[in-house]
Amino acid sequence: MEKKEIDFGKNPDGLVPAIIQDVDTKKVLMLGYMDKAAYEKTLDSGLVTFWSRSRKTLWTKGETSGNYLHVKEVFVDCDLDTLLIYAQPDGPTCHRGTISCFDTPDEEGFLGRLQQVIRGRHEEMPEGHYTTRLFSAGVAKISQKVGEEAVETILEAMRGDHERYIYEASDLLYHLLVLNEQMGIGIADLEKELLSRHK
């Protein structure tokens, strides 16, 4: 991951704030502080690592809980003294067991939440779930389902049946999210590609 210029000398303690945001839902997960060593370890390991001000040592988020934050992108503000990190969380970020350390309303989009449920199904493969059966069948079967749902969506559009169109388009989106997960791709990857086309 590309190392960016950061002004660690602006504050006497050599720390800069690092805001961690969910790469898919864009929900703010937490705020921590990094010194140069924490920043470099974050880039090298791909896991968010802070400087613990209380313990006076480096601390990789999730090293005790297993709820790591996997770095996807790093941004630096205009003054070069604050970081914004897009990360994919392994589980709850807060020690309270909540998604975020902030008590903000749950504003993440439903597609982002659905993607997280699908990802969980893929990791755990619980018996008796339709999504588990799709993953067990493999990429060819999932792709076939995406094709079937796309055709059904087109047919309802041609008929002009708005209610049936919404139903079939929802099926299409669900199966596309399953295929994305099978391919190791998230909503954020699609957003990044679409954004690159409109710069």
Image: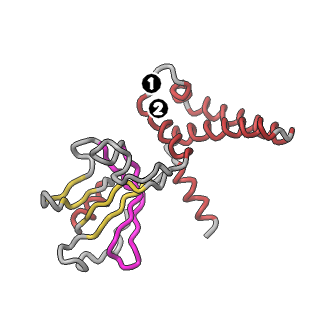
> Image quadrant for the C terminus?
bottom right
Element type where label 2 sits in the image: helix
For marks 2 and 1 on the same chain, the one whose residue lies earlier in the sequence: 2
Image disc number at residue 126? 1
| The quarter of the displayed image where residue 55 is located | bottom left
Residue 31 drawn above or below residue 65 = below
Q: Which residue is mark 2?
A: 121
| Left or right: where 116 falls relative to 162 | left
Residue 73 is situated, as x and y percent measured from the top left of the image, at: 42, 60
| Left or right: where 175 falls relative to 84 | right
> Image quadrant for the N terminus?
bottom left
| Left or right: where 149 falls relative to 75 | right
Residue 40 is situated, as x and y percent measured from the top left of the image, at: 26, 64
Q: What's the magenta region? A: 67-90
Kindly identify the amino acid type of the residue bearing the numbered disc 2. Answer: Arg
Residue 81 drawn above or below residue 194 = below
The residue located at (45%, 27%) in the rendering is 125
Question: Magenta region, mostly helix, strand or loop?
Answer: strand
Of 142 and 69, nearer the camera is 69
Check residue 33 for magenta coloring.
no
Given the current orientation, which residue lies at the most extreme right position?
159
Q: Tell how many labels.
A: 2
